[in-house]
Image (spheres, rainbow, N blue to C red):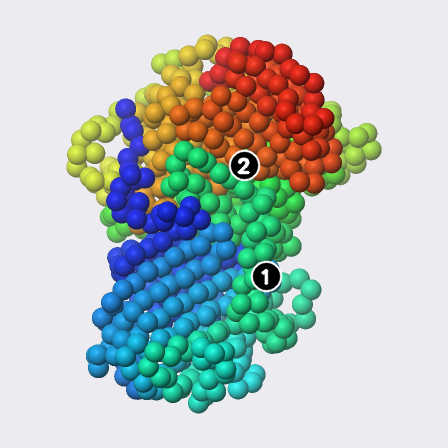
Amino acid sequence: MSKPRSHGSANSPEAAEDVAPDPWVVHFDGYDPADEGRREALCTLGNGYVATRGAGPESTADGVHYPGTYAAGVYNQLQDRIAGRTVENESLVNLPNWLSTRFRVDGGPWLDLDRAEILDYHQELDLRRALLTRRFRVRDEAGRTTAVTERRLVSMDVPHACALEVTYLPEDWSGRLEIRSVLDGSVQNTLVARYRALASAHLDLVRTAELAPDSVLLAVVTNRSAIRVAMAARTVVRYDDDTPARPERRFVDEGVVVGHDLVVEARRSEPVTLEKTVAVFTGRDRAIAEPADEAQRWLLRLGRFEDLRTRHERAWARLWERFHVDVVWDGRMLTVLRLHLLHLLQSVSPHSADLDVGVPARGLHGEAYRGHVFWDELFVFPVLNLRLPELSRALLRYRHRRLPEARSAARDAGYAGAMYPWQSASNGEEESQRVHLNPASGRWLPDPTLRQRHVGIAVAYNVWQYYQVTGDREFLAHDGAEMLLEIARFWASIATDDEARGRYVIRGVMGPDEFHTGYPGRELEGIDNNAYTNVMASWVLRRALETLGVLADDERLELIETMELDRDELERWDDVARRLFVPFHDGVISQFEGYEDLAELDWAAYRARYSNIQRLDRILEAENDSVNRYKASKQADTVMLFYLLSADELRDVLGHLGYQVDAELIPRTIHYYLERSSHGSTLSALVHAWVLARSQRKLSMEFLAQALDADMADIQGGTTPEGIHLAAMAGSVDLLQRCFCGLETRQDRLLLDPYWPKSHGAVEFSIRYRGQPLVVRMRGSHAEVTAGRGMWRPVQVACRDEVAELRPGSRVAFPLTGTFNLGSGGGSALRDAATRRKPRT
Ligand code: BGC
């Protein structure tokens, strides 16, 4: 059986040392150049508008360090000639490095950690406050010891504000402390080694200026998308008693690098503190005149580091109230869950809501996948829907604005409806690369992964789930229904009627398992009847028809008119939803038609030969073989069905398609693919932890540990430095709420079907259901839901077979052997029957 493999797993010493006794803190001790990339990604600070990696302010991109700054939605396109063809790539742009601050003493060399004698080094990410602190002591060639303490923030209060504070303590010397504080626009996109052979210079200089003796401006523009980006920075230096140090200043203006050299007469044992405050604006911002003008104006308004910090912390406190989570069982798990929530909210936050941005798969934390948006939001929405539904709505609007592009993509491919792109960035055009580099063989290869049409299923699923959680009919009636119906229309049109078998078939696609790009010998043509795609297409078609039923008459008529829907077309949708083909073999659902004819891979031999076989596709290609020949998946594919649909729902969809499902089909199918998966995507552990939760607790917990370690321990062995895995991060929180606590929002009520191991003690989290703040708590033997502060309307809560009404100011509890109400004015006492229902799957 393929078990989760840990590379520095939850219990390994190297992972454990990152978690401090305080579950709000992640810390790193000692300077370790080999680990710097992972730390930079994990210590990224952001606010959903802009984010900056946790690189040292003295560092530059040199193979060890990578000080990247990214603003949500700021993409640019560059062209290259590869393997005889012109390729264009759109990338999230690395913006000027606002952090850049170096020091030296008495004209000596500028501090370079990789050359200095480091006496001690400690780095700490405060999750509650989204504050990064770094402390170190260095001794220079002349034997002078300096202690440095640095704090930084990217404000959650004013999204355009970033700030750095550095305190220098001359421990055993007095002399000239020279500091160079600049905005460095010389940066390029060079983080990902695989892309380094491709064009990477995205920025042109617009202008630099010295705004005041302590302030400078740098304005640049992306060279194709023509997005202006401006940063204004103010650097001040003070002594310990808060008096200005009045340093000698020299304006530094070296083309795209602008700032000041400051010289302070430092005295032994007397700290000197620098504050650098930066205002960032881009041409994509709302309510602005021009980015450089705004950066200058706002720089004057931004207060001192302490003022910014206080307001920043208050903004985070408000967010944490919404995203409260507590787990008694395992302190490390709690820290990692909070780290995951932190990075989720740094990538998409209330500040993103106005920006017309999607959910970038790797956060705003690096350059992997060029900052593109995939289907990963499928794993992110369940967390946002239940806490910041207004943000989910804004992110769905990003998809809606790109509906015309998706319609046109479908038309160009010969289909109707909307065909959403596998990878997208600025305008919703397909941005998947057409050739990719296999680092194992050094070969550039054609890349057909855009055949993953299932991305539209994720969009439709998200629309439906958002509506289920929020009851937001207004959204459904307009943007939501239009997307859902256009996606359904696409599935009805790509499905062709195979009269011989009396079924509709969908040919030439790829499933979530990205290994199978085609059949042996026809490697780029996609596969036929991917079970995940076909079953979910049927689900989408039925939800589309159901949506028409939910809409008011005038809304329905308007939609039918604008979409030019007629009875024949709706009948076809209904017909396709009933007659799509689903392949089976050996008593399991086949991943796709013909899967059973593929060869079995000798997993043991490959595991023995390679230390890491997650990217089996690359290994086999480098061996002049092809993964397409084998029963081998990169990640959950068919198994995704059990992740998205409950056993009842799946039975319903398959039954609707005319397939009888025996009780063992699901566990059989899960185990069949478990033995044939390399778990080459961080999503795989997540999905397997979920689907095994009720049948194989131990294995499920091992997968959960792996999902928690995805970035914390860089489980893929080198991908975290290129950016976090946002879906795995959000998905791990979702595992807790929807899988282990069995939280669902159906039938106009909140449903709980807890499956949290009693031995793991209590778990608690806050959610918003239909606008009502609630706190859900599992305490081994019973589940409780408490009205949160500000709840004003009763909510129906059900646990297994029991239903209770939760009123403002009250609490309902459901013991496993019975259910009862607690607190004032709660619903009526409930019958004793909660354990009768069999667990799902
Ligand atoms: C996975 C995809 C995912 C993408 C972005 C790939 O490795 O196979 O499912 O969408 O990464 O996270």
Instruction: Give coordinates of residue 72: x percent, y percent.
Output: 54, 57
Residue 728, percent across and down? 43, 40
Residue at (37% x, 21% y) in the render: 696
Q: Residues within 10 Å of mark 2 (few under 14, many from 20)?
A: many
At 49% from the left and 38% from the top, the residue drawn is 326
Q: Residue beneath label 2, please?
A: 765
Q: Is residue 69 visible?
A: no
**Residue tagged by mark 1?**
311
Pointer 1 residue Cβ closer than 8 Å to ligand 1: no
The quadrant in which residue 300 appears is bottom right
Relative horizontal placement of residue 252, taking residue 353 as reference (left or right) = left
Q: Quadrant of the N terminus?
A: top left
Give the residue drawn at x 34%, y 31%: 702
Up-down: is 511 above or below 219?
above
**Could you tell me which residue is drawn at 47 percent across and 69 percent down?**
164
Query: Of marks 1 and 2, which one's residue comes earlier in the chain?
Result: 1
User: In the image, residue 664 lies at what x, y percent?
Assistant: 42, 12
Which residue type does callout 2 highlight? Phe
**Is the residue marked 2 within 8 Å of ligand 1, measured from its CB?**
no
253 or 792, which lies in front?
792
Element under disc 2: strand
Residue 653's disc is none
Give how far apart the Cα atoms at labels 1 and 2 are. Answer: 25 Å
- In depth, the one of 640 and 660 nearer the eye is 640
| Residue at the far right in the pictured view | 554
